[in-house]
Image (spheres, helix red, strand yellow):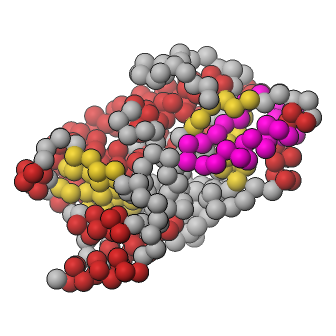
């Protein structure tokens, strides 16, 4: 009765947002059989994919933000809140990625496990929006809006979240602990191979052209992990605005470095990237869209790019090829379509 009352209060007070919930039964089971499984909710696709891989057929996952949805701006809907209230456990990224969901997650966390997947990451490896390490007194996973939450763009860093999912699921269902541990180990092995692919792929880009310019500052971890300079037209949150001075400065960098490609993002308007291309053209320097990158959301549900491994494979392969590197268009596992230009 207490949970029901709490749910009604939340439903009455939360502002409605765009509805993009994805519900996934990982085994395809329906009816009463699904009630024997752990019912998990995950805020974003990258976190949901961790839970699917570690939980396997023992966990049903409901994902709040789908493909193309910006989690920085997303407000939970009535249905989202209902699913969160009915879940056995809720996983979110943390580091203020889900800024407008923070209040809901905090309130629900008083009555059930609400877990930041990033909470076990070594704080020394976290970054600010400027690509610097966070100060020692600024390591919060929930309340510091200027920390950079885009940790999944470093596969070696994101793989540390696998153990968080394993441990939390084991706490809920200790009888399945061995299965969760086996799934987690297998997934971490795949992630290690993907990370190695990324290091080797980016290294094939001519050094002077290792410059990744995107819509907003989502790729600082990517740059540090794989040895490429990154610049965002906007800040780490898509709520910030890009000014003419910022765009002109980036145009000058493109010309000086002789870089001919910039990148749009699946969950962010391309208008600033298009302004950058036009600015370069006005100074006689041709710049093209090097491709679409997945930053705050994965690819379409059911596609290879709709998995975390597929998302990073796409980003690494697209970036490498557009900037003059040498990798096969089909990517890490030979599963990409091969058409990386947008």
Image quarter where the C terminus lies is top right
Closer-to-camera residue (153/311): 311
On the picture, is 15 further left or further right than 260? left
Q: What residue is rendered at 42% in x and 49% in y?
A: 66
Residue 272 seen from this side:
yes
> Is 275 rendered above or below residue 7?
above
In the image, is residue 61 above or below residue 53? Answer: below
Outermost residue, right side: 283
- Seen at 51% across and 30% down, the residue is 314
- Is residue 272 part of the magenta span, yes or no? yes
In the rendered image, residue 320, in percent from the top left (x then y), is placed at: 62, 25
Relative placement, left or right, of 27 versus 261 is: left
Q: Which residues are magenta?
A: 251-279
Front residue of this view, candidates 321 and 27: 27
How many marks are shown on the rendered structure? Answer: 0
Q: Position of residue 93 (x, y in %)?
A: 43, 57
Q: Quadrant of residue 67?
A: top left
Residue 254 magenta: yes
Foreground pick, 58 / 208? 58
With 139 as the anchor, is 252 left or right in this view? right
Q: Is residue 289 left or right of residue 80?
A: right
**Residue at image coords 50%, 57%:** 71
x, y percent for residue 96: 51, 64
Question: Is residue 156 at least partly visible in the picture?
Answer: no
Question: Which of the image's four quarters has the N terminus?
Answer: bottom left
Residue plotted at (38% across, 40% down): 301
Image location (x, y in percent) of residue 64: 38, 56
């Amino acid at each position: 009765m207490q949970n029901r009352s709490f749910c009604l209060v939340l439903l009455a007070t939360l502002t409605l947002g765009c509805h993009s919930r994805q519900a996934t039964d990982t085994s395809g089971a329906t009816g009463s059989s699904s009630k024997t499984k752990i019912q998990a909710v995950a805020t974003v696709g990258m976190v949901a994919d961790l839970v699917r891989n570690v939980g396997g057929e023992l966990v049903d996952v409901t994902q709040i933000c789908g493909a193309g949805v910006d989690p920085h701006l997303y407000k939970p809907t009535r249905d989202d809140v209902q699913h969160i209230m009915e879940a056995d456990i809720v996983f979110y990224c943390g580091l203020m990625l889900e800024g407008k969901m923070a209040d809901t997650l905090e309130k629900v966390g008083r009555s059930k496990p609400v877990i930041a997947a990033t909470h076990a990451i070594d704080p020394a490896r976290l970054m600010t929006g400027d690509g610097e390490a966070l100060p020692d007194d600024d390591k919060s996973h929930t309340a510091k809006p200027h920390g950079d939450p885009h940790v999944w763009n470093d596969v070696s860093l994101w793989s540390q979240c696998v153990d968080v999912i394993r441990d939390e699921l084991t706490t809920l269902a200790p009888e399945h602990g061995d299965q969760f541990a086996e799934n987690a180990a297998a997934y971490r092995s795949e992630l290690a191979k993907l990370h190695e692919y990324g290091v080797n792929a980016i290294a094939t880009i001519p050094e002077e052209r290792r410059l990744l310019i995107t819509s907003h500052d989502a790729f600082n971890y990517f740059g540090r992990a794989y040895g490429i300079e990154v610049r965002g037209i906007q800040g780490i949150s898509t709520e910030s605005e890009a000014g003419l001075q910022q765009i002109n400065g980036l145009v000058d960098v493109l010309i000086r470095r002789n870089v001919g490609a910039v990148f749009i993002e699946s969950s962010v308007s391309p208008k600033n990237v298009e302004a950058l291309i036009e600015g370069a053209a006005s100074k006689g320097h041709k710049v093209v869209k090097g491709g679409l990158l997945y930053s705050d959301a994965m690819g379409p549900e059911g596609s290879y790019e709709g998995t975390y491994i597929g998302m990073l494979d796409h980003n690494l392969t697209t970036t490498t090829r557009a900037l003059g590197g040498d990798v096969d268009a089909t990517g890490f596992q030979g599963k990409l379509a091969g058409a990386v230009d947008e």
